[in-house]
């Protein structure tokens, strides 16, 4: 399920050089270019969020009823397939790249939700995305996606994108992990999970729901965030210069916290029914 954003170019301008377009994408991380008989696929694959999207350069125009559009602009058979059922944070990232493409190559855009060819406008496309997502969910449901509070999900996504910055800030002296989404279908509960290796200094990201507690000699277990923080509260220090609701357990405190492992285990909820899901499956709706 996607919104198709088609690119147009003023007919008075010289023909676009697609070699330069592909050179642009090759400078960006996570993009790969594939060639088929009918199209060039400029694919983006994101390991942090486990999602993908793509731009296409096609042999023929895929714009429906193109004759109704402003004839001053030519469709250049170049389009974006914008996923609909993903977090708004990721959509804004995609559209930010699209905005750069339009500016760099003097492109206008058109989509079925717009009245005509127009200059790129981020606000217009965000509104189009939100309306398209609402309509799609009303008609087809949310499939395998999971609703999650918007403000919290935005902050979690910002953390996921800031991993390297956080690691650099702490000079690699504390553990900084990616978050993951997990779900227990039997209990009908899900949320954001994070791993803590017992005894290791670690940064804890915003808005956690669960903590995986891992020991060298024992099986890992899961504990709910409130129970974890209640027991380790005096060992945690809030990080005030990054994102809200971020904490760190420093080296000395991490060693002292080893003594709490039995108390943590007593309030654990087990791991057997939880499974990992893509972070991109959480929707801010």
Image (tube, rainbow, N blue to C red):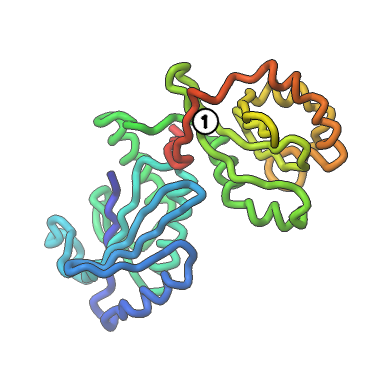
Q: Quadrant of the N terminus?
A: top left
**Quadrant assignment, res 102:** bottom left
Reply above or below: 45 against 57: above
Q: Is residue 51 above or below residue 184?
A: below
Query: Quarter of the image containing the C terminus?
Result: top left
- For the image, the number of numbered tags is 1
Secondary structure category for the residue under label 1: loop
Question: Relative to the observer, which residue lies in front, 211 or 56?
Answer: 211
Residue 139, given in percent of the width and then of the height, sits at 24, 30
| Residue 58 in view in this figure | no
Which residue is situated farthest in the front direction here? Answer: 217
Where residue 150 sits: x, y (%)? 51, 35
Q: On the picture, is 11 further left or further right than 181? A: left
Q: Which residue is found at the position 62% from the left and 52% from the top?
A: 162
Q: Locate residue 269: give its quadrant.
A: top right
In screen coordinates, is 227 left or right of 96? right
Which quadrant of the structure image shows residue 19? bottom left
Q: Residue at x 18, y 59 (%)?
A: 63
Q: Which residue is mark 1?
A: 149
Measured as percent of width and height from the top left, residue 104 is found at: 42, 73
Q: How many C-alpha atoms fall within 10 Å of the one at disc 1: few (<14), some, or many (≥20)?
A: few
The answer, for residue 20, to whether it is visible in the render is yes
Q: Pick whichever, 252 or 121, lies toward us.
A: 252
Residue 55 left/right relative to 101: left
Question: Going by the picture, which residue comes out furthest to the bottom?
Answer: 14
As displayed, is residue 190 above or below residue 162?
Answer: above
Q: Residue at x 41, y 69 (%)?
A: 25
Residue 132: x and y, percent? 31, 41
Q: Residue at x 54, y 39 (%)?
A: 180
Residue placed most toward the observer, 84 or 122: 84
């Amino acid at each position: 399920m996607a919104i198709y954003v088609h690119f147009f170019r003023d007919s008075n301008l010289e023909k676009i050089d697609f070699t330069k377009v592909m050179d642009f994408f090759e400078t960006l991380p996570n993009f790969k270019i594939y060639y088929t008989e009918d199209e060039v696929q400029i694919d983006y694959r994101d390991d942090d969020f486990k999602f993908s999207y793509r731009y296409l350069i096609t042999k023929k125009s895929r714009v429906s009823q193109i004759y109704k559009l402003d004839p001053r602009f030519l469709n250049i058979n170049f389009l974006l397939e914008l996923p609909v059922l993903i977090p708004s944070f990721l959509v804004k990232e995609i559209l930010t790249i699209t905005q750069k493409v339009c500016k760099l190559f003097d492109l206008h855009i058109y989509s079925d939700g717009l009245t005509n060819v127009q200059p790129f406008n981020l606000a217009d496309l965000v509104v189009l995305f939100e309306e398209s997502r609402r309509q799609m969910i009303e008609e087809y449901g949310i499939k395998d996606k999971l609703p999650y509070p918007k403000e919290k999900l935005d902050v979690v996504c910002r953390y996921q994108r800031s991993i390297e910055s956080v690691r650099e800030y702490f000079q690699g002296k504390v553990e900084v992990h990616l978050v993951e989404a997990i779900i227990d279908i039997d209990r009908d509960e899900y949320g954001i999970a994070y791993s803590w290796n017992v005894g290791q200094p670690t940064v804890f990201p915003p808005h956690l729901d669960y903590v995986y507690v891992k020991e060298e000699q024992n099986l890992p277990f899961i504990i709910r965030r409130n129970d974890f923080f209640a027991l380790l509260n005096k060992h945690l220090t809030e990080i005030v210069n990054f994102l809200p609701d971020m904490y760190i357990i420093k080296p000395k405190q991490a060693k002292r916290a080893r003594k709490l492992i039995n108390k943590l285990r007593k309030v654990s909820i087990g791991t057997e029914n939880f499974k990992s899901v893509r972070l991109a499956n959480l929707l801010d709706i």
